[in-house]
Every structure is written in C-alpha cells, then in structure tokens.
Amino acid sequence: MSELWVERHRPQTVGDIKGQRAVVDRLKAYAEMRSFPHLLLSGPPGTGKTTAALALTRDVFGEDYRMNLLEMNASDERKLESIRTKVKQFAKTAPSPGTSFKVIFLDEADALTPDAQGALRRIMEQNSQTCRFILSCNYSSKIIEPIQSRCAVFRFRPLAEDQVLEMITSVAESEGINLDDEAAVAIAHVSLGDLRKAITSLQVAASLDSNVTRDLVYETTATAPPEELHGYILACKEDGFQPARRRLKELLDRFGLAGTDLVNQMHRELGSISFLDEAQKLAVTEAMAECDFRMVEGGGEALQLDAMTARICSLIGS
Amino acid sequence: MAEPSADDWTERHRPESIGLMEGNEAQLRRIRQWLNQWEGGSPLEKRGLLLSGPPGVGKTTLARAAALERGWTMIELNASEERNAAAIRRAATHGSQHVSLDQFSGSSVSNGKTLILLDEVDHLSGGFGKVSDGRIEESINPDGKAAVLRGDSGGKAELLNLLEVTRQPVIMTCNDPMRLWGRNRNWRRNRDRLLRKAELVNFKRAGKLHLRRVAHRVLDAEGRGMDPEALEALIDGNPGDLRALVRDLQAVCALRKGHIDLSAVLDLAGVSERDSQIDVFRALREVYQSGSGKEANRILMISDKDPDEMLAWFVWNNQTVFDSEVLAKISPAMCMADRSLATKYTNRAFRSWYWGSALSSQAAVSHLPIDGASDPFLAYPNFLRRGGESWRSSTVVEYLSEDLGTSKASIREDLWPNLLAVHDSTLGGDPREFTVAKHLGLSGEAHLALHGIPRSRREARRILKDFDSENTSKPEEVIIEEIIEDVNSDEDETDGTQSSLDSF
C-alpha cells in the first residue's frame, strides 16, 4: 500500500487516456508520427496534463523515454539562472542514439517568472532540431505571448462526472476494492472533475476499509454530504437561528471540517438548491464570502460562523 | 509509420533575405537604407537599431536575413544566456572592435561586417546602473577566482557603451521598449540615452494579405494543397503572428494526409486556440443568459480566463447589461469579489480566488438584463486594452505623458480611463464643461476627442469657439506628490524631477 494509486494507474500510452477525446486524438497522431512540435497544455488540476505529456513521450521513445526527458516542476529550482544553465545544457546535448530529439517537460509553467519565460523562448527556437518543449499550466493567459506563439496549444477540460465514475470504478476493481455505486458517486462529487483527487480519495478511504461506502468517503475526505449542507440552509430558512446554528456545529464536529472548508463546500451546494432564487443566492454568497474573508484574516471561527448563520437567517428566513 | 522528422517548419521556412519578408514595408525600407550606409564604411551616428513589436512579425528574422544576404558574420546574444556587462563586453563589444582591426590591416574580407544581434533586450533584468570597468575586466579574466558579475548586472549600461564604441552594426529586438527603459522615474532619461545612439523601428502585426502570402509560400514549398476556405479560417483565427501561422500549418498538415479541407482546420481550432483568440464574448453571453449561478460557474471553469481578468470583463459589461438599479444592487458583491482576489496576494489565501469568480458570476445571473434575457451587447473592457488603439487618443496621451512627466503606458492605463469616464456624456459629462481639459492644459481638439465628438460635426465648431474664448491660461500647477518607488533606482542617476502617476 505504499505506492500512490495515482502513479500506479497513470495511463502509460496516449491511447489509454480516458476523456479529453479531442486532445487525445491529436496526440495520438503525434505518437504515430513519432514527432511533435512544442506543446502547451493548459487546464485545471487533475485533468491529465502531466499524464498526457509523459504518455506521449513514452509513445515516441519507448520504455527508455526517461533518457530523453528532462522533467522540471515547481519544486525544482526554476529561476532565470536555472533556465539559462540546466535547461539550456540539456537542450544542447545530443539526443540518445537512434532518436532525433529530446523532450523538456516544464510542469506548472505559469509559475515561471516572466524573465525565465523570456529566456526560454530563444532556447525553444535555437534547439528545435534536437529538443521539444512541453509546458503545462492552469491558465494559458499566464504564459507570455511569445511562448504561446511558439507552441501548439491544447486545452484540457475538467472531467465529466461519468468519466470520473468510469475511472475510479476500474481502479477500484483492479485494486480489489469493494466500491458501491453510491460511494462512487460520492467520490465523483467530491472530486469536482479532478481525477487525481478522485483516485486519492478512493485510496484514502480504502486504506481504512476495503468496503468503501458513501459515509466512509465523506468522512475520509473531510467533506460534508450534500443533504447535510442542504439541511443547514433549509434550517436557516425555516427553523431560525438556534436550530441552524446547532446543525452547523454538528457538521463541523462530525466531519472534522475547518470553517473555511465548510463555507466553501456549502457554497458549491448552493447552486443546486431550488428553494432560493438567484438574487437570494447572491445575497447568501455575499454572506459566505464575507465570513470566509474574515476567517482568512484571522477572525475567530465560531464567532464568524454564527454571524454568517444569523445573516443568512435574516436574508432568507420566513 | 511516417519517418520521424524533427524539422520545425518555422525554422525551415524562415526567409533568408529581406526581400522575402512580408509586411512592414516602410520599416524594411528604412532598415535597408541603414544597412546600405554601413556598406559605405565609416560608422554612422546611430549605430544601432532597436526593433520593437509583437511576437512573430519578423524582428529576429530580419537581423538574420540581413547578415545572410550581405555575407556578414553575426554575433548573437539572447536572453537564454547571461548578459551582464562582462558577457556583453566579451562577446559583443570586443567583437565589434576586433573585426574592424582586420579591415584596417586590409584583410581579405574588405567589406565584411559583423552584425551584432542582441535579442529580447527588454528581458535584460535590472536597471541602467554601471558597474566599474575593473569588475568587468576581472569577470572577463577571472584570475582563477570565480567570475564577479552574475546574472544580467550592468547589462543595460554595457549596451549603451557598446552602441557608443561599436564599429559594427548592432541590432536589438524587444516586444516592449517600456520594459527596456524601466518604469521608474528615470525611464525617459534612459530612453533618450539609448535612442540617441539607436533608431527605434516599430514592427506591426502582420495583415491578412501577408498571412495569406506566407501560407501559400510555405504550402507550395511543402507540396501541400489547402482549400481556400480552410486557409481563410486559419487566418481569421490568427492574431497577426507569422510564426504561429506557420506552426499551425505544420500542425494541420501533420494531422491530415493529402489535401487540407475546412474540417481539419476547425478540428485543430477546437482544441488549440491560443489565449488571445479565446472567445470570451461567447462565454460572457452564455453566462448572462444562463440565469443560474451553477451554470455560470461551469462556463467560467472552461473559459480559461483567470478570475482577475474575468472580473474586469464583468465589471465592464455589467454597465451595459444592467440598468442602474441592478448595478447598485450588485455593486457590493462586485466589490467583495475584487477584495477576495486581492486577498490572494496579501494573505496567500489562494482559495479566495474562488469567491472572486463565484461572486461575480452569481451577480451576473442574479438579475435580469435590461432587455430581458435577449442577446446582450458586449464590449471589450477598455482598461484591458493596450497600445495605441485610437487615432484621437494618441496625441492627447503623448501630450499628457510629456506634461506630467510619466510614461504613456501609465497615462493610458491609469489616467485615460478616468478621463474618458469623466467626459462620457452617458454618465453626465458635459461637452461645454471645460474645467478638466483647461486644468490639464489640453487643446480644444483634445477636449473634443475626450468627448468622442468628431470634428466634422457642426456642434464641434461651436464648442471649439467657446473653448478658445474662455480664459486660456493654465490655472495653478497640478501638484503631484512624488513617490520613491523604485528601490533599485540607478546610483548614477539623480534626476528626480519626474514624478509618477501612481500618486493619482
């Protein structure tokens, strides 16, 4: 159980990647040609950017792909200096025998300073015969335009819930975990389209009990189930301050939530609440954002959450 | 399996002579003249060219083509190398002298010049502060000790020195000259010092005609065919960047065998739009029409704009989408969104980002647009605009920048939007109210420009007459407090007469 499931179940070839159909089709064509241009992969976390980069490199170079790959992420030193030394050195050395180029994979490239990005662009051009760059980022607008101009840009979308369901079901199966349907839906709900988060949640839950149930998922991920959150907001509307306050306290204790987590999860549920109109939802959103802000600034959790409850009660109470 | 080809079309089809380059005709003509003068022998007064412009319009290509077609050698220093004073002196300044000595002694290459190309000079970090010659020499010949100079220190000062002493043509390129002279209060002096020795040539984005020509040339050379409407679709999505065009061509040709039709291009566009092409209007329209905060959030998730930028789009467009009553109702939410985004920086509370987009998108769907839920009229946020977009703003901006002693960029970004807002007639601006314009010492024409009144209108002439007949003397000086903002201001520059607009 020491290995991370996220790593163990990472697709090895481009063809194995689930979801991102439009992107994968194109990457497959590159894999067949055994060549590709500089790539910029952009999209939210857990949507397969790193997986796609590694799988493509493996498809092109085979099992020894690490010989031809320099992988750098935000944990490595990536100041202007290291771009000028480490990256440039690697870009300049000849590719291993039998291959025509090497790959430099810069994960989280939006964390590179503009100066470092500036240094990159001529390296990308001057060594394009022998070296390809793959950059990944959350927002492509954080990458300077000259680099975007040098890359084929691919956008990754958050995974749909059924895609996440399909993936975790197959992971659970191969790990010999008993995952019931309700629990699978809960994991998909918690993950918000982030497959890495989904698989990690599954692993954490499974480490306690190989029979993964819905309750176990919510407990281990420190997430309150939607009906509990609905219950709180309904209590604000119908029952008034004291009952709503009791429910909130119970939620915090039972699921081991921090105040800011709770507020955040509660807002994500707000969208699916049918007994409030959009203008009321805006008012409630404001109350939640204000509460979150005060807690982030160091306000006391119990006090701020009580104030939020009072305000929501007065906004929507009947 | 196709043969593994490591070829990059953007390199393979880089023009090898200036004559093959597309677009920027006047600029190229001027550069030709300058190059021809170098053939004449004696160094000119302006020994450098500073080529400025957006990516992919041919700045680096031009320098290379110039050297190639004239048989000159070339020394290139770009941002991928350390470019401190010692590095530039060793590679460029010394080089710029040595070759001329060869010529002196009547060596074989009688007219051979060495073109010195300093790419991306706006990415030289640091200011124009000098480092002593002693330290530079020590760094060049380290005497066993480690090199003294690190990073780019003294690089900009050595640039000035190089332009002063060079006997060879020097070409520098940059995307944003403002970045080269820096945004501190010495920017103007830095600019003047550099432009005394180097001529600034502005490259423009490539037009459709040029994009088309380049595409045809590349396709012919590669022996590939493409439907005209497919090519038009590719060009329509291109922001005037020739390199991106060639790269897109390579991408579609790699993915389709044989003739390229429209579907191939649309396929590619589906996943590979560059940031500047993303259809944010579509996303906004969908948000305003969605009528649900949940749906709005989903749309924003896939829009690939970060919350900061999205907030700007909302703030701007809410003004046209909602009536003033709704605007007043949602303004607390918008303020809170703004504050949440700021909290991310001040408190490193990255989750605050969430509230930035949650609040602004919920605000956008919480009330009905002015004309029901029908197609809202959307506009590009003015304060996101950069560059001289409007013919009438440029002279006014230039004047204000001169008069207030600050950069044009900061006038455009900080002062200009406010001036426009104050003068906007829909917000109660009166074209016969001259106080602001007079106070700033603007001309009557500039006053008209601020109100967006074309001079051809009859009303314009009357306003101009009234403007001139009012007391024209500039009232008391506008007092601008000075902020000492640049920590690494250059030691050798004590010019403190310029003030910063940030104090507004």
Image (cartoon, rainbow, N blue to C red):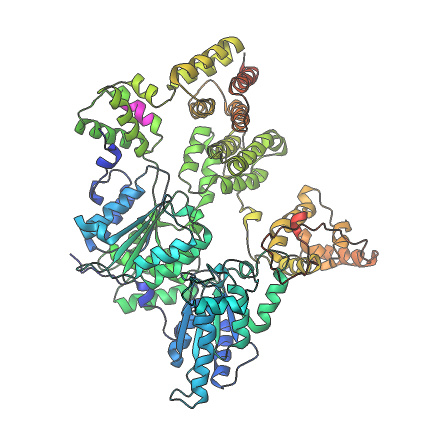
Above or below, comparing residue B384 to residue A236 in the picture: below
Where is residue A255? Give x, y as percent.
38, 17
Foreground pick, B153 / B262: B153
Tell me if residue A270 can be seen.
yes
Where is residue B334? Give x, y as percent.
57, 33
Quadrant, the N terminus of chain B: bottom left
Foreground pick, B440 / B315: B440
Residue at horizontal 55 percent and vertical 46 percent from the top: B381
- The magenta-colored residue range is A184-189
Q: Is residue B169 left or right of residue B397?
A: left
Could you tell me how many numbered marks the image carries? 0
Above or below, comparing residue B49 to residue A282 in the picture: below
* SS majority, magenta: helix
Residue at horizontal 42 percent and vertical 60 percent from the top: B241
Q: In this view, does B223 lie to the left or right of B301?
A: left
Residue B280 covered by magenta stretch: no
